[in-house]
Amino acid sequence: MKISADTIATSCPESEIYNRLLSLDGKHILELGCGNAEITRDIAASGTDRRITALEVDEIAHQQNLQITDLPNVTFKLAGAQAIPLDDASVDVVFMFKSLHHVPVELMEQSLREIRRVLKPGGLAYISEPVFAGEFNDILRLFHDEQKVREAAFNTVRQAVDAGLFTLADELFFNSPMAFDSFDDFETKVIKVTHTEHTLDDNTYNQVKQRYQTYADNDAARFLMPIRVDLLEKGAD
């Protein structure tokens, strides 16, 4: 296993990656850290006979998700990966989209054990994590440096594989496209996210805005975020 790749040849929406790696129809799917349920919606509406349990720890996002009425095959719950409110061996596929590094470091190992607990034998955990590199990261690290927590997330996954909790079925890297219509759009979606409190002084705010503008064209900016995907398989108990 490796935390980053020297070169990444593939650039595509993440849906192309998980749909290539996984068969989701007829499955009970668990998403940990579903955020605003954007990916949840894509998974729920793109196939047949999919039952999804979507967990989120951000109470604001969770309350907004509870207002969704057009996804009858999705159940939203307020809970974290370290204490999953599901029965043993009840889930076919677990997703964590760029969320493991948001779990407190002291709870990461417990979260991996919880994922193993709820997975059926032969079940798969798809864990995607941003690589600490790239132009978007160059802006983010000015006010929210995630290098240590991303390293901790990678080490937790590697240790779980080394300990035999999972088998590494695949590891791959790709670039995920990101786009912002303006700096105001960036500020709303990144600086003012509800799951993390970012408090920027005037100097830092101006640095972030100036750095954003170096990548912008008429205030709109596009980025490619490098992502690592670890696909873990649970063996027989």
Image (cartoon, grey):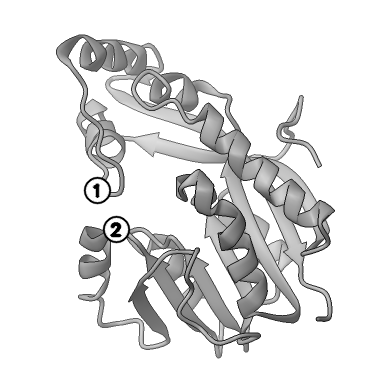
Q: Is residue 73 positioned above or below 109 on the image?
A: below
Gap between marks 1 and 2 measured at Cα: 7 Å
Residue at the image point whose x is 25% and y is 14% from the top: 204
Few, some or many residues within 10 Å of mark 1 (<14, 14–19, 20+) = some
Q: Where, by quadrant of the figure, is residue 59 drawn?
A: bottom left
What kind of residue is marked 1? Thr
Q: Quadrant of the C terminus?
A: bottom right
Q: Residue 90 carries which label?
A: none
Q: Is residue 152 above or below residue 83?
A: above
Q: Is 197 drawn above or below residue 166 in the view shown? A: above
Q: Nearer the viewer, residue 152 or 203?
A: 152
* Label 2 neighbour load within 10 Å: few <14, some 14-19, many 20+: some
Residue at (77, 49) in percent of width and height: 171
Rendered location of residue 98, percent (x, y): 51, 48
Pick the residue in front: 16 or 59: 59
Q: Is residue 76 left or right of residue 107?
A: left
Which numbered marker is on residue 58?
A: 2
Which mark is first along the chain, 2 or 1? 2
Q: Work out which residue is located at the far left of the displayed protein and give it.
A: 202
- The residue under label 1 is 194
Q: Position of residue 157 (x, y in %)?
A: 69, 50
Residue at 48%, 26% in the rendered image = 137
The amino acid sitting under disc 2 is Asp
Res 227 visible: yes
- On screen, residue 157 above or below 148: below
Placement of the N terminus among the 4 image quadrants: top right
- The secondary structure type at the circle numbered 2 is loop
The answer to which quarter of the image holds residue 185 is: top left
- At which x and y percent is residue 19? 65, 65
Label 1 with label 2: CB-CB less than 8 Å? yes
